[in-house]
Amino acid sequence: MKYYPTVQQLLEEDPKLSEEAVRSAVEELELSPSRMNRPLHYISNERWNATVAIGLAHGKSIFCFPYLDSYWKERIRVRLEICAGIVRRNHRLMIIPSDNESVISDLVDEMIVLE
């Protein structure tokens, strides 16, 4: 049987932030206490918030999200806004690939268009 660490285990695994800073990130990202002891693939769209908390706990500077079309962006808009705000406040970089500027324009400070 394959082992999948829980969100809580990933947060506690060699964190670069203090326990208080990790707890604060978890609260800011509105992670459900009932989902903290589940692997990432069992927490639905809350995984977006959880991966940002885990990345911050481990001192990561760059947060990459998968390609977002209009359909997905609308379904996870609130989560993306929360994640973008926290990444921005922590002076980190967030990359969101998209083929439509309007899909991400309200989430980013700067866009780079690749031709």
Image (cartoon, helix red, strand yellow):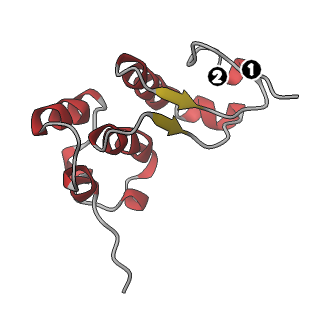
Q: Which residue is label 1 attached to? A: 101
Placement of the N terminus among the 4 image quadrants: bottom left
Position of 59 with respect to 105 (left or right) is left
Residue furthest left as drawn: 20
The answer to whether 82 is drawn above or below residue 8 in the figure is above
> Between residues 20 and 38, which one lies in front from this camera angle?
20
- For badge 1, the amino acid type reads Glu
**Residue at the (59%, 32%) spot, across then down:** 95
Quadrant occupied by the C terminus: top right
Q: Quadrant of residue 28?
A: top left
Inter-mark Cα distance, 2 to 1: 6 Å
Please tell me the numbered disc located at residue 104: 2
Instruction: Decide if residue 90 is on the left or right side of residue 64.
Output: left
At label 2, counting other C-alpha atoms closer than 10 Å, the crowd grade (few under 14, some 14-19, many 20 or more) is many
Residue farthest along the right direction in this orientation: 115
Residue 64 x, y percent position in the rendering: 55, 39
In which image quadrant can residue 13 be found?
A: bottom left
Q: Where does the image place residue 56, in percent across and percent down from the top left?
A: 32, 37
Residue type at numbered disc 2: Ile
In contact (CB < 8 Å): disc 2 and disc 1: yes
- Of the pair 62 and 44, the residue shown nearer to us: 62
In depth, the one of 46 and 114 nearer the eye is 114
* SS assignment at label 2: helix
| Quadrant of the image occupied by residue 22 | top left
Crowd band around label 1 with a 10 angstrom C-alpha radius: few (<14), some (14–19), many (20+): few
**x then y, percent, for residue 106:** 59, 14
Which residue reaches farthest bottom? 1
Q: Residue at x 56, y 40 (%)?
A: 65
Between 13 and 4, the one nearer to me in the picture: 13
